[in-house]
Amino acid sequence: TPAGEQRAAPGEANIVALHSLARTMPRLAARALALIASAQAFYLPGVAPRDYMDSDKVEIRVHKLSSPRTHLPFDYYSLPFCRPDNLVKQAENLGEVLHGAVIQNSPYEVFMGRSEFRIACRVELTKAQKITLSQRVRQDYRVHLIMDNLPAATKMIAEMADGTKKDMYDRGFRLGFLGSKDIPGTEPTKPYVNNHLRFIVKYHRSDTFPGSRIVGFEVEAYSVKHTYEGQWDEKSPKLTSVPLRPDLAPMLAWSNEIVYTYDVVWEHSPIAWASRWDLYLYMGDDQ
């Protein structure tokens, strides 16, 4: 730089360059400025914790379907699942946008501190949907959900070489399973779908902030052939298969209808919000 001149700061240089570009290419410059503004407005994971008061709604978003066998992801709503009245794409951070992830809203209604059982919906399947659902179960697809920017995880207990047991986690949860002689009530090789989800939400409280912070999101998936009284009533269905019991038959993927249900369990956790991602560092990923 010649003596007496001052080099512009990086941010100033960018602004000067954009204004220069604006004089020759107005539309392109306007788009560039808008992109920078929107990028700065994105929420960055791990920067801003959210405090939930009792009964605050906690959003669950759907992500994708993935398989360690095919490595081919599918949109969550490509299968006959329950849908909200209006589908909205809801990427939670800039990384999801750049990665091309399709994050959408879900019909699940979860409220801070409320442990409850709910019916999500009843779906009547076409022949094409039966074929696709059965195929995805056979291909070992997993379902991925997101709560408060945390991906859903399945907890497993692994037995170590020394005989001790250790909690392990896997991303998402299994769409279903194949029947076998070792699983009561199933027919060998036939596909069954997990149509009941138990959301185990772990929260942390402290005197340093109001309300609660979510530090864990686990899902337990079950297959239940729900039954109900008389004709299905959308406004007030009466299930005869609740409370859930071990003797209930599982839900075949090749069925004319599937009733989806879920329940929510809240567990206090000593894990601080800043450490909530630790367990995900030791997970495998099928993508």
Image: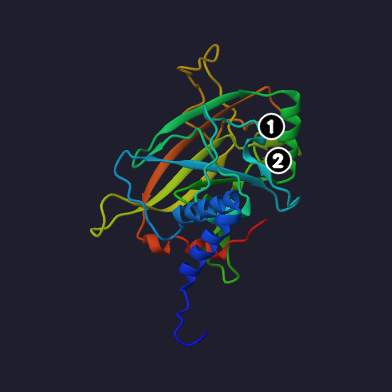
Q: Is residue 137 left or right of residue 18?
A: right
Task: Using the image, tell me which numbered label, if any, was put on residue 184.
Answer: none
Task: Tell me which corner region of the image, top left, top right, bottom left or bottom right, holds residue 254.
Answer: top right
Q: Residue at x 61, y 49 (%)?
A: 101
Query: 160 or 210, which lies in front?
Result: 210
Q: What percent of the width, then of the height, locates residue 46? A: 43, 60
Decide: marks 1, 2 in contact (CB < 8 A)?
yes
Q: Which residue is mark 1?
A: 253
The secondary element bearing badge 1 is classed as: loop
Q: Residue at x 59, y 48 (%)?
A: 27
139 in relation to 46, above or below: above
Disc 2 residue type (three-letter) = Val
Query: 191 or 60, which lies in front?
Result: 60
42 in relation to 184, above or below: below
3 in relation to 267, above or below: below
Q: Which residue is mark 2?
A: 137
* Quarter of the image with the C terminus in it: bottom right
Q: Is residue 187 visible?
A: no
Disc 1 residue type (three-letter) = Ala
Q: Is residue 177 left or right of residue 113?
A: right
